[in-house]
Image (cartoon, grey):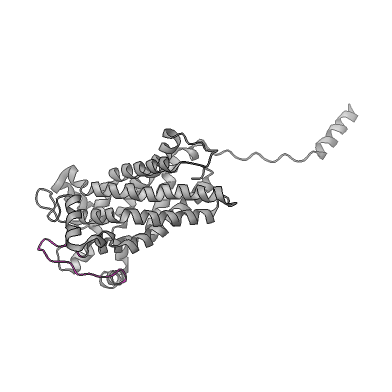
Amino acid sequence: MVVFGALSNRLASEMPPVPPAKPEFPKFVDSLWCVYIVSVVAAWNAEFITYPLDLIKTRLQIQGELNKNGEKVPYRGMFQTAVGIGTEEGIHKLWQGVHAAFIRHLIYSGTRIITYKALKENAFKQNAADPYFPLWKSAICGVSAGAFAQYIASPTDLLKVQLQMEGRRRLMGLPPRVHGLWDAFRQVWSKGGVRGLWKGSVPNVQRAALVNLGDLTTYDLAKRFIMRHTSLSDNHFVHVMASCCAGFVAASMGTPADVIKTRVMNQPLDDRGRGLLYSSSIDCLKKTLQTEGAPALYKGFVPIWMRMAPWSLSFWLTYEEVVSLVGAKSW
């Protein structure tokens, strides 16, 4: 018995130590709710970093349109607009309306990501072991996710655009139209009710569908293409390359609809909640082409691209990093 015990102890001492079991993450990290939360956090980070470019883009898109007296608003370039906001209104005004943008992304960004993933994994039954996902399927997922998310988030976009234009209105000697987010909501509701909150939603949804076709679809395909045709693993360098592609394609596809959306949303309303400048997005498109020509549809493209490229980069790097930290599946 003593010999058997000594032999057992010797064998136990010679065996390699058993590594401690890795803690299992709860299933929540791979759920759509976790994806939703991570998407919102990533979007808030990207939005704060790039928001001044969004404000400049909005101001540029309004320039050149006719006001209700038939007079054209004078032009300023991108750099002049940025300097003008900083010197005439204050540096902090470059983030005017950012709280409305945060509220928008609380709805929009989380919804678009989980809708894309749900369609991709459930409707089209993508196999996680197979990195290939056809372009046409990815395009359907991107367009559908962007359109759906933007439609339900459209009221927050409307409030953001109105807040962004207040500093410029006051410099032009015009009376303030709104005095904050709640006041903007109250005025839109009192003039147009529920329908008023979705003013400009048609071009907004069109823009979002095109932007997400460029962003979600391009990022997804670019990342998988790079990993499939190179020896690179799922790392930051791959994320940077894929997000740069996504930002450029998204800006190219979404700028015309973004111009129309901004003008429709920013126009003044009559007592019945109807636009004084444009009766619809089609009317806005016609008047823009008649008075300014086709190049007007790409007004603000440079700041849009300069914003979407770092926005996409910031968003996807933050998203992938947070996903890695919580132990969930990568994109």
Q: Position of residue 118 (x, y in %)?
A: 42, 37
Q: Residue 177's quadrant in the figure?
A: bottom left
Is any part of residue 307 visible from this angle? Answer: yes
Q: Is 69 covered by the magenta stretch?
A: yes
Residue occupying the point 44% across, 55% down: 245
Q: Is residue 98 above or below residue 149?
A: below
Residue occupying the point 37% across, 41% down: 140
Quadrant showing the N terminus: top right
Q: Position of residue 291 (x, y in %)?
A: 17, 62
Q: Position of residue 198 (x, y in %)?
A: 22, 46
Q: Nearer the viewer, residue 192 or 246?
A: 246
Q: Is residue 10 left or right of residue 203?
A: right
Number of dots carrying numbers = 0
Q: Main secondary structure of the magenta part?
A: loop
Q: Is residue 29 above or below residue 307?
A: above
From which residue to which does the magenta span run?
64-79
Q: Furthest residue to the right?
A: 3
Q: Is 290 covered by the magenta stretch?
A: no
Is any part of residue 52 visible from this angle? Answer: no
Q: Furthest residue to the top?
A: 1
Q: Position of residue 130 (x, y in %)?
A: 53, 39
